[in-house]
Image (spheres, coloured by chain):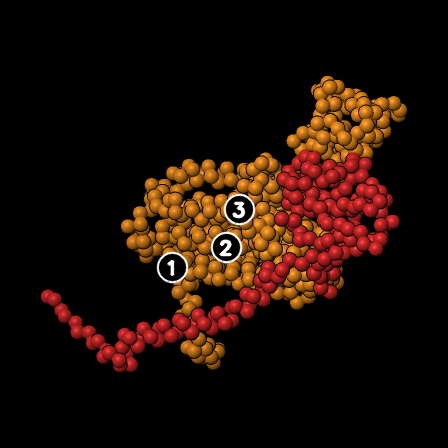
Chain colours: A red, B orange
Amino acid sequence: MNRETKTTVPPAGGPDSPERRRFLTGLCLGLSALASAVVSIPVLGFVLAPLLRKEERAWRRVGSVEAFKVGATVAVTFPNATSVTWDGSAGRTAAWLRRMKDQEFVAFAISCTHLGCPVQWKEDANLFMCPCHGGVYYSNGEVAGGPPPRPLPRYNVRVRDGQVEIETAPIPFV
Amino acid sequence: MNSLRKLWAEIDDRTGISGLVKPMLDHLVPPDSKWWYVFGSATMIAFMIQVVTGIALATVYAPTAGHAYDSLKYITEEVPFGRLVRGMHYFGASFMVIFVVVHMVRVFMMAAYKYPRETNWLTGVVLLGLTVTMGFTGQLLRWDQNAIWSSVVGASQAARTPVMGKWLAHLILSGDTVSSATLSHIFAIHVFVLPGLVMAFIGFHVYLVMRHGISEPPKAGNPVDPQTYRQSYHDMLNKVGKPFWPYAAWRDVVFGTLAVIAIVALAWWIGPPALDAPADPTIVEARPAPDWYLLWYFAVLALVPHRAEDYVILLAPALMGLALFSVPFLNNRGERSWRRRPWAVVTIVFAGTCIGVLWLAGAREDWTPNFAVKPLPATVIGPDRGPVHAGGIAFNEKGCMYCHAVSGYGGKRGPDLTSVGARLSRDQIVIRILSGGYDMPAYANNLTTEQLDNLTAFLQSRKAR
């Protein structure tokens, strides 16, 4: 036996009408999205600000020309392009600096091109060696052995007013 | 007593607590779900220890690059119970990793990921990823030499990604270089974002366990058929199932208590991991390595052939994740017993063996040049003058012994040269020295003729005794 059930359709335009229901649903979803966006956009902008910031570079003095012997490779340190007072020692970077001639210098990054570990200059061996996975570089930064895919990156160096200056660069070098 | 009951009745009436909790406690579980089933709850208990000890540590830890290391030293050395709480946080993390892996292996071997519990598995994979990420970010918060160089290593790996590598590296470091922003972003992720996600996914995971019920231990010859599984599962529960509380819960409580005691005991006995030197990107003496649970991956990065590195570094983590996610999609029906699923057994044995062998390799780090190695003593070099003597000195000075051992002295990265004189002719030795090899630098421009002759004489004198 079929039993017919009567369903009451709310009158159009009434308080329970399907149109009003759809409108209220859309209103709630739309306002929720708006409120979420109003909060999320500045928060995301704040959190992601370091990514949006333009890459900054700066020339940093690392010592007078006379302080470096011709042919010697030494570690020098300098402040990052952007640093804040609460950076502590993390606000500085190091490089391997070599005086080639009287006014000519070359500065190598200390980060291995394999995975970024700090390479060490071994004076007697005349090699840069990485302690992590055994990457080795010749004194000119070319890969001598191990897994590094590229030579050691170089910083820009110049001499100004008797002072050696290095231009900061992002780490890792990409 | 009556007044207390009355008070509870009033509270329960207003809050509905018993209506929320009672179905969880009373839900029926298969009667033979025993000790193999305790690792899920144990993972949650380890996580709860992480939350409690983490909140305690955060009350003293200073998340700025200039102060983080000192605050951690202060926690460890001066704050009452500081060493113990840090140790509990470390061993809690270690146990969480162990429990989540054992839990997943159990679920895989018992094929509990099959219909209708596929989503349980998928949320579990997400929780595994979150657990490991939480461990790694926690390691970085130590903000010692290991931590800052590990963050550079992470950024360097990301930097290999085509097109967006630079952007990803900046995302990881939160800027152009390691800085205070790196630490504060990692801190926020470790203490807010990741725990929040873990809590959300644990909640979803437990809800799914309640929805689909605890899987019954599999029996060979009783395959899963989506058409009939739910009905037969509920029939079985109605027939022989037991309320979770206390007939199954007692094992969770016993094992959980033992786990808590073990974590506290290890924290008290061994203490937290020692801090490396203070974080300073200008100090090049650093050998970053991950905590123990990622040592096997550390070994992968060292041992993979150089030409395949980009693919392994970028694709391996993605493929591992994809492989885990794909498990329930590959096969969600049929036999659940491991006795009828030989490939499941092979998979676990193979994965376990690979990870175990790589883990041992990662712990030994034989690929690392040993800069701290002692020079060859005169007793090993032999003559006190002449070419062999001078060659022994050159072997020390030219960095050969960072990688090569002679008579027990030296590194392990390259071949042991104790008996190289019996193995190779003079010409072969000269060619090796001048031309280098896969991992060895060519010394052609790095030695005088005299140094080369001396070095060759020294190596030729190394015969097996």
Q: Is residue B39 above or below residue B427?
A: below
Q: Between disc 3 and disc 1, whose residue precedes? A: 1
Few, some or many residues within 10 Å of mark 1 (<14, 14–19, 20+): few
Q: Is residue B79 above or below residue B361?
A: below
Three-letter code for the amino acid on which mark 1 is drawn: Arg
Three-letter code for the amino acid on which mark 2 is drawn: Leu
Q: Between disc 1 and disc 2, whose residue precedes? A: 2
Q: Between disc 3 and disc 2, whose residue precedes? A: 2
Residue A59 x/y as whole percent: 74, 56
Q: Residue at x 64, y 38 (%)?
A: A147
Q: For mark 1, what is the residue?
A: B211
Q: Residue at x 51, y 52 (%)?
A: B128
Instruction: Mark 1 vs mark 2: give the one in front.
Output: 2
Query: Is A37 left or right of B74, judged from the image as shown?
Result: left
Q: Which label sits on residue B317?
A: 3
Residue B402 x/y as whole percent: 75, 35
> How far is mark 3 from mark 1, CA to CA?
31 Å
Q: Splitting the image into 4 quarters, where does residue B454 fall?
A: top right
Q: Residue at x 73, y 45 (%)?
A: A108
> How far is mark 3 from mark 2, CA to CA?
15 Å
Query: Is A63 left or right of B344, judged from the image as shown?
Result: right
Q: Which label sits on residue B127?
A: 2
Residue A163 x/y as whole percent: 83, 53
